[in-house]
Amino acid sequence: MKDIQVGLIGFGNIGAGVVKLLRENCDVIVNKVGARIVLKRIADLDITSDRGVEVPPGVLTTNVNDIFDDPEISVVIELIGGYEPAKSFVLKAIERGKHIVTANKALLALHGPDIYAAAIAKGVEVQFEASVGGGIPVLTAIKSNLAANRFSSVFGIMNGTCNYILTRMTQEGAAFAEVLQAAKELGYAEPDPTFDVEGVDTAHKLAVLVSLCFGTRIAFADIHTEGISNISGLDVKYAAQFGYRIKLLAIGKHVDGEIEARVHPTMIPLNSPLADVNGVFNAIRLTGDFVGPVMFSGRGAGQNPTASAIVGDLIGLARTMKAGAGRRMSPLGFLDEAITTIPVKPMADIVSKYMLRFSALDKPGVLGNIASSLGSHGISIESMVQTAHEADDTAPVPIVIMTHEAREGSIQQALAEIDRQDIICEKTSFIRIEDNLE
Amino acid sequence: MKDIQVGLIGFGNIGAGVVKLLRENCDVIVNKVGARIVLKRIADLDITSDRGVEVPPGVLTTNVNDIFDDPEISVVIELIGGYEPAKSFVLKAIERGKHIVTANKALLALHGPDIYAAAIAKGVEVQFEASVGGGIPVLTAIKSNLAANRFSSVFGIMNGTCNYILTRMTQEGAAFAEVLQAAKELGYAEPDPTFDVEGVDTAHKLAVLVSLCFGTRIAFADIHTEGISNISGLDVKYAAQFGYRIKLLAIGKHVDGEIEARVHPTMIPLNSPLADVNGVFNAIRLTGDFVGPVMFSGRGAGQNPTASAIVGDLIGLARTMKAGAGRRMSPLGFLDEAITTIPVKPMADIVSKYMLRFSALDKPGVLGNIASSLGSHGISIESMVQTAHEADDTAPVPIVIMTHEAREGSIQQALAEIDRQDIICEKTSFIRIEDNLE
């Protein structure tokens, strides 16, 4: 049987993992495909640094056209990341009739529709299992085994850096800045961790999940995105006191013809399986009308798990090629003409429970004042904790309120109003609560 | 686009679910396949009982040959369960060139190799995602997305009846017989629950998982199978005291050229994600050399989740047919010639930690006696609890011992020797411990 010839663009850490996996498990792959999967060319600007893996002579090139122009190469793996030149390279490979495998969630979140349309027009496949959840095979499950379902929701803990930081803040009562520093030193956070810590990476992944689950084109700007840099040790402590854990949660819902797509710190019940997803582990939980809730978890990043997903995509493509077929499935699992643009619910219209943490002067009437402001916006209180004052009775005291379900817009208006009062010492913090993870 | 015509054999609860799903989510399926999936004929001996779903006239038949003889029918769903006539029907459908979708784990566990060989010879596919874990898409993940990995272990909680019973025993301190009776009344246990409660159903599913993960033919008789009917409230209580929960666990391992395949009540650490899989939920956890540990959970049975998996298989086959290909993948994901017969480690040779619960007379020297018997078989003690005696000092007292790792054969010999002594009042119970679920 003829080898499947593959080109790789971008020879970084993940690329080296792919090289390693294809060599170490060559026999496993041959046993499942009936052919070898061979990395014929690897293109990168830097072809001299040691990646810790051996590459046969003649494979490395600084000229990406060596991949595009090689008619034997039927699949191109894109691992350079970012928007450009990744997008141009992917489009050029498609134009040359090559299937695409990519781990680039940023590219798919912002330019997915262009790439999918080009692939459909050319009759090639685009596979991207590694873009969400590392080695966790959730995307294919949505596109294939669970494809008969109408999905109502998808929730994900999908950024290892954030989850590591929040886990340590929870377990050790440590502060955000301190844990972030430690995470950088351990290599769990990038030197510039903005994309991770501010939720952008998670939002990229949510964009991919939402497209697949609901068959919709979603504008990345429509995903409300907040990170974890404002979460304090106090928030973590009070959340625990009320029976919750704070996670950076990606939330996708499809209800009554509208979509919710948002990423923000979220309080989830301690007894929820997602609450126990700790450290660098990722988990995705989705609910379909027939399958009910299903959850997937595993290592969401790293050289080896990501390589596992990429080579899994290659094996799928190789099987389809061997069966004599061209394109077997459209990129999102939906026919192109079936993909719609479902309106995204404005953030002000979402309904949630909230934990509000006020920093207020310790004066009589303060609580009544806050409660009536909330009430005047239709927000009712489920429970409340006011910490007894210790020594200095002029210092502000924290007042923590759990609300019943309320409109986000009402919460924002009420807090703006309350924060203007002299009794309030700093901007009130609020964290959304997700009680029902189905 | 031409409809995909399907025949269904066995119109029970799951069959009715398939009818319902194909109708209710017809638009979802068309949007993903570009064709309708139509149940052209449904064969059952009873075609008059009301299944709660509407079937167009002319679809129901008592003559299964109406399916075999119909050249338009390209896929046959087998849902009659059991060995015969299921096996003959499946082989006949394959002979007629029809793809097979089945949920029948008993059939696959005992006759899988015959069926797979027939399908490979004829160039048709056999899909069986619904046979393990209901709607949880674990089998396809193993065959496809995770296919680049060498798997070292697979663990599963895969029987809802057992898990429901053990969960209630744990949460309420209730006795096995009492909870089983309640489960029968609630419909969570069959009137004759033997296959579930004695671990046979779980062992069928483990046989399927082990074949897929390790690419081996496994004789069903080689799977050591114990159920939960001997688990007492005392076992559950002591397990909790030592930081464990008892689950009916399916264990598959591939180490040093040998396979372990066993189903038995197992103590797993309270902080393991599998310990929190409660009630009728199922979970499967596997470890591959590149992906690391991955876990899948969801509803492991029931009409709707099982129908989700069956129609997911149909969608996969429909996509392959639409792409113009015949067989895209062999039944186990391995090439037929790559499937071997890996020897199964004899149960006496497995190594595990154990909780031993002795019922002994409350006499001086008893503990020393037990400890030296264990020691003489090379079994060392990690910790021990001897409950203080209450009123009647002639009644037996429980002595509970946690061992370090020991050979099963040594444990069996030591307990046989100890149980022969007059100081022991009833057969000593032992439960295996699985500390490392990777």
Image: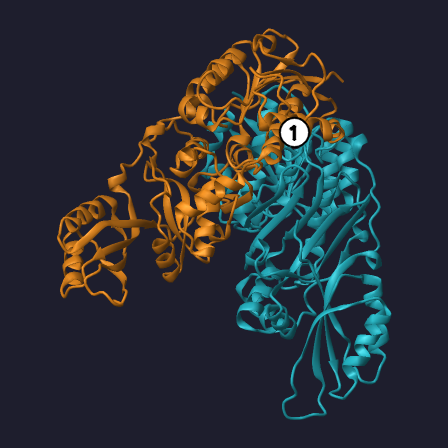
Chain colours: A cyan, B orange
Image quadrant where residue A148 sits? top right
* Observer able to see residue A201: yes
Q: Is residue A225 left or right of residue B415?
A: right
- Where residue B325 appears, x then y in whole percent? 63, 18
- Where residue B402 appears, x then y in whole percent? 29, 58
SS at mark 1?
loop
In-front residue for pair B37/B427:
B427
Image quadrant where residue B14 sits? top right
In-front residue for pair B300/A298:
B300
Locate the N terminus of chain B by quadrant: top right
- Residue drawn at point x = 68 percent, y = 61 percent: A266
- Where residue A142 appears, x then y in whole percent? 65, 38
Residue ID for mark 1: A70
- The image shows residue A270, relative to residue A142, as above or below, that is below
Q: What's the residue type where badge 1 is placed?
A: Asp
Q: Is residue A93 left or right of residue B367?
A: right
- Residue drawn at point x = 74 percent, y = 16 percent: B2
- Residue drawn at point x = 71 percent, y = 31 percent: A330
Q: Residue furthest front?
A: B392
Q: Is residue A206 left or right of residue B370?
A: right
* Observer able to see residue B158: no
Q: Residues within 10 Å of mark 1 (few under 14, many from 20)?
A: some
Number of numbered labels in the structure image: 1
Label 1 marks which chain's residue?
A
Image quadrant where residue A424 sits? bottom right
- Where residue A293 appears, x then y in whole percent? 62, 44
